[in-house]
Amino acid sequence: MYEIWGDAIMSKFEYGIPKLNSTVQKFEKVVQAAGQLLNQDKIKVLFGFESNINIIVDETALEKLDIDKKQFNKILNSEIMFLLECVLDDAEEFALSVPFTIRENKEKLSKIEKDKFENDIRSKINIIKEILVKDELKRRYLIKKYSKLSKINQLSWEINKKLFNSRNNDINFNYATVNIKLTKELEEEVIHLFPFLKSEYKIDEIHFDCDVYDINKLIEFFQEIKQKLEKIK
């Protein structure tokens, strides 16, 4: 398994500046492959978990498909995630304007080129809608988007060994330290013109030590929640 998300170019866009410069044919082929993996539960799409959209792909399943892996990764990273969030957020005009403005600032586009570029983006949006956007995905996105609670910004852990305590007692025991960063974003009205700007204003951190027994208890805790959610799905 591996995770794919873009570098935050200019520290403004969650996935970097979207170029959307692949051909519609190549884009559609990648989206079809992603849709196939999604239907097979070989792609996990997470919202508000370490990034706005976090796509986790089963590498073994991807290698079985008739598609260039490098091209798949590039288009998924630089185009699909951006357009998927635009569609889920009902911000299609934003999807059209931002890449267009960026490209026009770098190149002198003729009227024909401008029209083709815009039509290509509209075609890609329609492909995303047809293949990837399902009711459940939309509902999951909206829950996270409008939640007033903190979101997980980062998870990390490390294995440590305690030899002695402050009283010089011999302990000699392995344990894990878990670190969780939680973030809250600015209120919607502050960034409504730029829904994809990363606008964190507060990060809380939780650190705790645990052993295998603690971890087993946590797994039981989350498994119970998972079973309840799956039962009422």
Image (tube, rainbow, N blue to C red):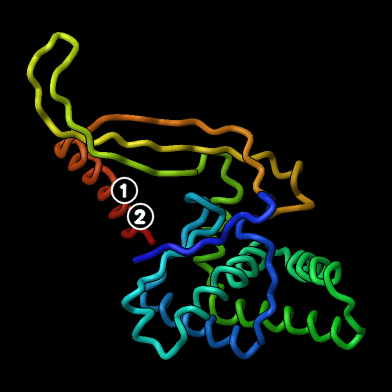
- Percent from the top left, x then y, of residue 13? 67, 55
Q: Quadrant of residue 75?
A: bottom right
Taking depth in this image into account, of 69 and 38 the one nearest to the observer is: 69
Residue at figure coordinates x 34%, y 79% from the top left: 61
Residue 64 coordinates in the image, percent (x, y): 34, 85
Disc 2 secondary structure class: helix
Residue 148, numbered circle: none
Q: What residue did someone put label 2 on? A: 229
Of 195 and 224, which appears nearest the observer? 195
Q: Residue at x 66, y 49 (%)?
A: 11
Circle 1 Cα neighbour tier, 10 Å, few/some/many (<14 / 14–19 / ≥20) = few
Numbered-mark total = 2
Instruction: Report x, y in % for residue 147.
Output: 57, 44
* Residue 186 location (% of width, % of height): 67, 39
Q: Is residue 129 above or below residue 192?
A: below
Q: Are marks 1 and 2 in contact (CB under 8 Å)?
A: yes
Seen at 59% across and 81% down, the residue is 130
| CA–CA distance in space, label 1 to label 2 | 6 Å
Query: On the rendered structure, is 23 left or right of 41?
Result: right
Q: Read off the residue under disc 1.
A: 225
Amino acid identity at mark 2: Leu
Report which quarter residue 103 is drawn in. bottom right
Q: Relative to 204, is 6 above or below?
A: below
Tell me the quadrant of the picture where the C terminus can be found: bottom left
Type of the residue with mark 1:
Ile
Left or right: 233 in relation to 201? left
